[in-house]
């Protein structure tokens, strides 16, 4: 399970205005609580489609008065909180850049998109059967983000069934895919499973995730297409 910093777009302190007023920029979707309380200003539990978190001034004054934190959506756009847009809070339909190092949200149309989030839950056990890997949200600002586990599906650079892979011996930073018709393809992925016993007929080799205890489907069932470079070198001495 890789980790990602919990980041979101925080809008500066704002004043309440009518939604029909010309100066209105965003609409409150959910009131979170007093800004600055634990777990609120760091990682609020906002619904999908929210563009940012605003701190709204209230009528209260005095030393103990705090702005109210609210989840807001822009009235006229842009909408970075739309699924796959690459901004605001990470939720279902958004994409992440990496599951190997410290990941970050990225537009799903970006060629570096690693995987799409199919669920955001409290624990990895709650991920749906379609999820292949997980990523855990962490906050550098204190407090625990709500539903910290991102369940990652098979869209993006993540290796999934039906794709072919390059020589694992040169897989710096993770396995790389290749066109199955390419000479670079040394094996075809038939399935990703929880155990070797679940691999389908035709499987010739198995690859295991480096962090097997954290992977949802740690076994990659592959059908060998051609020898690796290491195997070809060894054959020269036989």
Image (cartoon, rainbow, N blue to C red):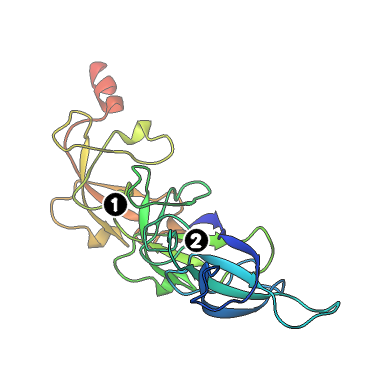
Residue sitting at x 21%, y 46%: 163
Residue 147 appears in the picture as rendered: no
Q: Position of residue 174 (x, y in %)?
A: 40, 41
Query: Residue 85, relative to residue 222: is it above or below?
Result: below
Q: Position of residue 112 (x, y in %)?
A: 37, 43
The image quadrant that residue 153 belongs to is bottom left
Residue sitting at x 54%, y 61%: 137
Tell me the quarter of the image containing the C terminus.
top left
Mark 1 neighbour class, 10 Å CA radius: few under 14, some 14 to 19, many 20 or more: many
Disc on the earlier residue, 2 or 1: 2
Q: Is residue 91 left or right of residue 57?
A: left
Residue sitting at x 35%, y 41%: 175
Q: Which residue is mark 2?
A: 88
Q: Which residue is mark 1?
A: 220
The image quadrant that residue 185 belongs to is top left
Badge nearest the viewer, 2 or 1: 2
Query: Residue 167, relative to residue 32: is it above or below?
Result: above
Classify mark 2: helix, strand or loop.
Answer: loop
Q: Position of residue 38 (x, y in %)?
A: 70, 73
Residue 140 vs residue 16, the one in the foreground: 16
Residue sitting at x 43%, y 54%: 86
Residue 234 appears in the picture as rendered: yes
Query: Residue 11, relative to residue 36: is it above or below?
Result: above
Classify mark 1: helix, strand or loop.
Answer: strand
Give me the C-alpha separation between circle 2 and circle 1: 33 Å
> Which residue occupies the extreme front position in the image?
22
> Which residue occupies the extreme right position in the image?
63
Mark 2 neighbour class, 10 Å CA radius: few under 14, some 14 to 19, many 20 or more: many
């Amino acid at each position: 399970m890789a980790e990602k910093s919990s980041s979101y777009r925080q809008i500066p302190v704002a004043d309440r205005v009518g939604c029909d007023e010309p100066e209105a920029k965003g609409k409150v979707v959910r009131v979170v609580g007093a800004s600055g309380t634990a777990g609120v200003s760091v990682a609020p539990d906002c619904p999908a489609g929210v563009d940012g978190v605003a701190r709204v001034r209230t009528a209260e004054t005095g030393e103990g008065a705090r702005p109210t934190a609210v989840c807001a959506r822009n009235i006229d756009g842009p909408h970075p909180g739309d699924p796959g847009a690459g901004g605001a809070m990470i939720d279902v339909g958004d994409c992440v850049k990496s599951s190997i190092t410290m990941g970050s949200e990225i537009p799903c149309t970006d060629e570096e998109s690693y995987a799409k989030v199919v669920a955001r839950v409290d624990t990895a056990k709650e991920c749906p059967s379609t999820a292949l890997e997980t990523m855990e949200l962490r906050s550098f600002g204190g407090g625990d983000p709500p539903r910290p586990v991102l369940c990652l599906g098979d869209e993006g650079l993540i290796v999934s069934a039906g794709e072919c892979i390059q020589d694992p011996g040169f897989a710096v930073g993770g396995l790389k895919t290749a066109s199955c018709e390419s000479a670079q393809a040394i094996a075809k992925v038939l399935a990703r499973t929880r155990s070797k016993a679940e691999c389908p007929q035709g499987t010739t080799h198995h690859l295991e995730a480096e962090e097997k205890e954290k992977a949802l489907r740690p076994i990659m069932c592959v059908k060998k297409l051609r020898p690796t470079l290491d195997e070809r070198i060894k054959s020269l001495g036989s």
